[in-house]
Image (cartoon, rainbow, N blue to C red):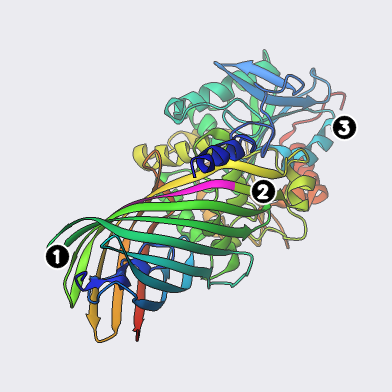
Amino acid sequence: MRVLPLLLLLLLASCLDPGEPGNLVPRTVTEDAALPRLAINGTVLHAEAFGDPANPVVVVLHGGPGEDYRSLLPLQALAADGYYVVFWDQRGCGLSQRHDASIYSFALLLEDLEQVVDHYAPGARPLVFIGHSWGAMYATSFINEHGSYGGRIRGAVLSEPGAFTKAQLDAFLRRLMGSYDLFGEQLNDIAWSGQFMSADDHARADYLMMIQSANGAPAEHLDPANPEPRFRSGAVVHRALLELAEKEGFDWTTHLSSFEPTVLFLRGDLNEAANLASQQEMASSYRHAEIVTIHGVGHSMVWERPAEYVQDVRDYFARIGFAGGGR
Amino acid sequence: MIRPAFAVMALAGAAAAQPINFGAVPAEQTHVVQVSGGLENAFVASVGYGRGLSLAGRALVLTGDFTLPWAAPDLRDFEARVGVIAPVVESAEWKLSVELRPLVRGTSNQIARMTDLGLQSGLVLGYYTTRWFGGCELGLDWAAATYIESSARYRELDYAGAKDGWYASTGASLRGGLFGGHSFGRVEVVASAGEWRDLHLRPSTVPFFAAIGVSLRLPR
């Protein structure tokens, strides 16, 4: 009998470590020297850019919070149009460095984005944001804070932001969470999986989030036959920002009316959470905004309908006079 | 002879440690079958069997139960437990019991198939009479070792380098709750509810549980 505990300990010691990066989730930039990176503002971001660095810049902001830019990579097609297209995993997301939840604030995220912009679009280089979901909210918070950033921000493509204010966020989350079937397999899998893995470290927390967010919310109408690829979820930042929003509230509409460029809201008509009415409400906060709808697609429009999405972006760039380099 | 109202309490329960009424019947040689259901990391239904024994003058109950989430039934999602619950401190109708329940649990989702060898342990403080009983419980659910086999989708879309194999101590949760029940004849009705927290005391994925069970004591 005395041998049994020892045997059990030996067996456990021979098991893999779920918290070891590389086992269940890929390593981040701080653990894998081969990954492309950008060190700014006390963190190291997973980042890469396509095209000629001298060209007008497109800064892509992924969704979440806590997702990554992998499913937005079809936008690198814009590099062939003469743009310098920048992809980066936001702080704590994707393959970027992980941090404790206590460091996060909306002000810190604004500093991060400012330094990303200054790095990839130095001087007076013109730029446009393309923000998807949370990324569209992030871009709006920056515009609300910095306006056109000295005339450098020439426009923004905002794809299905959830909210610009706390009240809008509450309504959005009700639509999103209310779409789950209480007795459906998806919610059942999310709930049951929580017994197998607990968020005791970044790797386990991220893996659990990847399990639980694999199919998106039903209201988003992602195509199950064409799921989005992901690098790695960022569970801590996801939770931290939602808690911040709940605790501090936010209103990123206070200065949007002074932003002169026209903003494009590019949406899919199937998304019931970021529905047309919500997009119209948010668009009305900007001085000049237009809404373009891609039909027959939900929230994963960049991944599922890349050609249409990129064409709509090209058309918008033409309308606002944001020409690629050499054009 | 051990006081009534002991046996049903230990069994009752799906994943939640719904108590047995140690006060209603003599525990020795008591056979109990139970069905229960509730919200316990999913909507679940359980069947179980308990056998009361007396060991060195002390009552204990051996249990076994099988649980399936019933919403969108999928036989790859399951939990099977064996266990023992035994009072360690007694004073009249009050009993402080220890429970240990080794378990095997499975799930299959878009990312992986997982099989977990775990252990639920806990302390149950209860007041047991022949007709009524109630109390509180504190427990730990430990996923001691989990075999994880990544899905083809996860490898193709997300992470090709994911390693399949046994993983040590993938998760742990704390459980705290209240229970109460009523005995009439050979039947006991038991209800329990409470909260799940992780080891940092943050709410778990499904942060609360609630279950109700009906137990039938079989003739000796």
Whether the residues at callouts 3 and 1 have beta carbons within 8 Å, the answer is no
Asked whether the residues under marks 2 and 3 belong to the same chain, the reply is no
Q: CA distance from mark 2 to mark 1?
A: 45 Å
Q: CA distance from mark 2 to mark 3?
A: 42 Å
Badge 3 sits on which subunit?
Answer: A
Judging depth in this view, the residue of A316 and A226 nearest the camera is A226
Across the whole image, how many numbered discs are drawn on residues? 3
The numbered dot on residue A80 is 3
Q: Is residue B114 visible?
A: yes
Judging depth in this view, the residue of B129 and B205 nearest the camera is B129
Packing grade of label 3 (10 A; few <14, some 14-19, many >=20) is some
Three-letter residue code for mark 3? Ala
Position of the C terminus of chain B, as image quadrant, is bottom left
Q: Position of residue B143 (x, y in %)?
A: 52, 48
Range of residues picked out in magenta: B138-145
Asked whether the residues under marks 3 and 1 belong to the same chain, the reply is no
Task: Name the residue carrying label 1.
Answer: B93
Which secondary structure class fits the magenta region best? strand
Three-letter residue code for mark 1? Glu
Position of the N terminus of chain B, as image quadrant, is bottom left
Residue B7 lies, with reference to residue A66, above or below; the image says below
Outermost residue to the top: A123
User: Which of pointers 2 and 1 lies earlier in the amino acid sequence?
Assistant: 1
Whether the residues at callouts 2 and 3 have beta carbons within 8 Å, the answer is no
Q: Of tags 2 and 3, which is closer to the observer? A: 2
The residue that appears at 62% across and 46% down in the rendered structure is: A210
Q: Position of residue A107 (x, y in %)?
A: 45, 25
The numbered dot on residue B148 is 2
Image position of A190 (left or right of A159): left
Q: Of tags 3 and 1, which is closer to the observer? A: 1
Q: Of tags 2 and 1, which is closer to the observer? A: 1
